[in-house]
Image (cartoon, grey):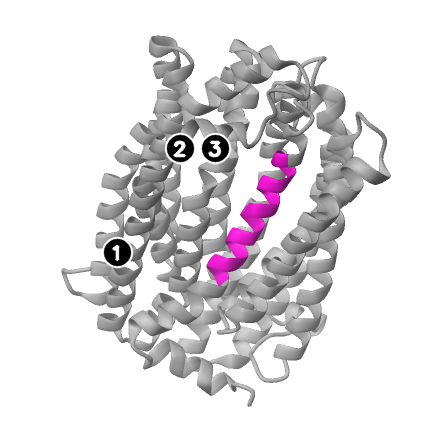
Amino acid sequence: MKKTAADKNELFANVPVGKALFTLAVPTIISQLISLVYNMVDAFYIGRTGNSFMMAATTITLPVLLLNISFGNLFGIGGGSQVARKLGAGDPQSARKVSAFSFYGAIATGLAYSILVWIFLDPLLRFLGASDNTLRYAHSYGMIVVVIGTLPLLTQMVLSHLLRNSGYSTQASMGLSIGGILNMILDPIFMFVLLPKGMEVTGAAVATALSNTVGCIYLLIAYHRSSMEAPLSLDPAEARSIAKSDIGEVFSVGVPSAILTGLFDVANVCANMIAASHSDLVVAGMGIVMKIDRLPNAVNIGICQGMLPIVAFNYTSGNHVRMKAAISTARKAGLLISVICITVFEIFASPLSRMFLSTTAGDAATALATVAYASSFLRVRCLASPFQFINYSSSYCMQALGDGKSTMLHAFIRELVFYIPLMFLLDRILGEIGLAAALPVGEALGVMLALFLLQRSINRRSGKANA
């Protein structure tokens, strides 16, 4: 039997917190893990070539791709959290207008971004650290995944956020999962069967773009069907009739969330530039680690995304005790995952790194050097995981409360005051390993600020002292 919108509200309002968080977070975690796996599959198959320059090229294009996530957060988290708050306030009609505005805003932004990247792609890649050895691979990947693939990627991200924050977590996660599973199937076909040797990066890019398109189509269908019973809409008229105050609320949460991801992107740019100043192999090694250490992040972001609508709904409905219980439960789960991942990474850093680059298929000397860099970087960077989770969860909580100013302040200080300056300082003092060490040190400093800002935000909104 179909669940109605009232059933979804029951999940937010009355189902035991642990069960509600489990119900919302598990599908999201699964989709995050599938997305992670298919990203790892890209790197895994590229690594089978033994070509460190191909691996470095995909790392260089990462900041360009991550800006899509910024735009997705702008309209997905900004619009999604507002939809959840409107549901908590008992105003489904306004929620429909917010969802339609977020959908069309994402499309317009995605088109504009694709055109800009198309015009400036090669100079941008050079700025990000592309060398003569890596430029042609990076150009191919960026043209297909970003210029051509931005619109379906951005659309599916926003649709999944809107569905999840309306209580349709399973449908949201299914769309992302379909794209991920399909990419795992298509990767080896395009890389090693359909395209000639030397075009493996292009094959991976084509597989990714096609998979995102299929996932987007599924989510459009699921979103349309869910709109029959949920406060969701694709009607342009409803998008145009949204209240100015609601637009302000979308951007008050969405802009800080986008800036947070954008600043993370800036940090990656700086990391790539510093790594490139050492060698292409350091860039490739860091790229391997950025794939592996996304595992705890993927699980913890899934937990945070499951937590957000519960916090937003109960904040607006006035049930602050339940809101704080959701925050506490999510925090315990995320920290447990982080500790487990640190243990695994410290023990198995070397074999995990070898999974992503063959030391026998290509130039063995460069491959072995790249794996050595990756192993060392992983053992250091993985220590950031629990601090990253607290920073993520605090940011998601502040977004759920509609406190965009605190979210933005945290993002700016965490990246621009702590992490980025530490990259340059520690790299200068300790070399490449200092670049890796900047992440846990910067995230640890960010935690102190995050907890202070979150507590202040809760106190201001609930009038009570304890989170």
Q: How far apart in space, not on screen, are marks 2 and 1 (Cα)?
A: 25 Å
Give the percent coordinates (x, y) of residue 421.
Answer: 37, 21
| Three-letter residue code for mark 3 | Leu
Question: Who's the residue at 38% across and 54% down the image?
Answer: 396
Main structural element of the magenta stretch: helix, strand or loop? helix
Q: Nearer the viewer, residue 287 or 124?
A: 287
- Residue beneath disc 1: 332
Give the percent coordinates (x, y) of residue 69.
Answer: 57, 46
Question: Who's the residue at 34% across and 11% down the image?
Answer: 430
Q: Nearer the viewer, residue 119 or 126?
A: 126
- Crowd class of label 1 (few under 14; some 14 to 19; many from 20; radius 10 Å): few
The stretch in magenta equals 28-44
| Three-letter residue code for mark 2 | Phe
Q: Nearer the viewer, residue 462 or 58?
A: 58
Q: Is residue 407 visible?
A: yes
The circle drawn on residue 348 is 2
- Residue 188 placement, left or right of 258: right
Proximity of marks 3 and 2: CB atoms separated by less than 8 Å: yes
Image quarter where the N terminus lies is bottom right
- Residue 110 placement, left or right of 160: right
- Crowd class of label 3 (few under 14; some 14 to 19; many from 20; radius 10 Å): some
- Residue beneath disc 3: 352
Q: Is residue 115 visible?
A: no
Give the percent coordinates (x, y) of residue 44.
Answer: 61, 35
